[in-house]
Structure formats: C-alpha cells, structure tokens
Image: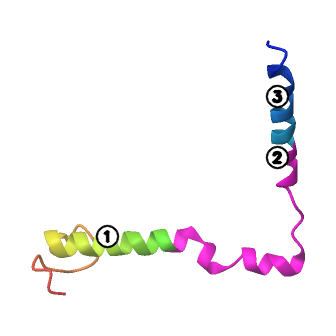
Amino acid sequence: MNRLLRPTAACLLLGLALAQLSSCTHVAPYEREHLADPALDTQDRERAYHRFAAHIYEAREGAGAVGLSDVAGGGCGCN
C-alpha cells in the first residue's frame, strides 16, 4: 500500500469504529415512553393500508359479491 494511503485508511477505520461505538446509548426509563409511542408502530399502519387496499379492490372488482372476502360490495364504487 502507498505510504500516504496507510494513515488515511487507518484514520477512516478508526473513525468508523468510533462512530459505531458512539451510536449505542442507554435509554432512561422516563425516555422509554417516547420510544413506545403508538405512532411509531408500523404494524397498525400496515393493517390499515391493507384494509384500505382490500376495500378499493372490492369496490372496483366487485370481489365482495362473489365471496372472496367477508365484505359485501358491488362493482360500481359507490359505497
């Protein structure tokens, strides 16, 4: 390796190691309530999105009328 490149690579590796170690932190009990905020839960948003997408599909295709789901609907999209 080039003489100039060795110290640069060592500094880069040291900097990456320090950045990795500094990202770990202790969370105090009074701060945990902010981390457990329901708005941060992606599962609820995914369930809501899938319900919405199913509703749109059923309204467009009339899939609820033929028994593909438990929601009755028509193909006109007027619901």
Circle 2 residue: 20
Q: The C terminus is located in which quarter? A: bottom left
Residue displayed at 82% across by 20% down: 4
Image x and y of residue 13, in percent = 83, 33
Circle 1 residue: 53
Magenta region: which residues? 18-44
Describe the element under mark 2 as helix, strand or loop. Answer: helix
Task: Mark 3 vs mark 1: give the one in front.
Answer: 3
From the viewer's perspective, is residue 7 above or below residue 37? above
Describe the element under mark 1 as helix, strand or loop. Answer: helix
Residue displayed at 46% across by 71% down: 47
Q: Nearer the viewer, residue 77 or 15?
A: 15
Q: Amino acid at mark 1?
A: Ala
Asked where in the image residue 71 lies, by quadrant, the reply is bottom left
Q: Earlier in the sequence, mark 3 or mark 1?
A: 3
Q: Residue furthest left?
A: 76
| Residue 39 lies in the magenta stretch | yes
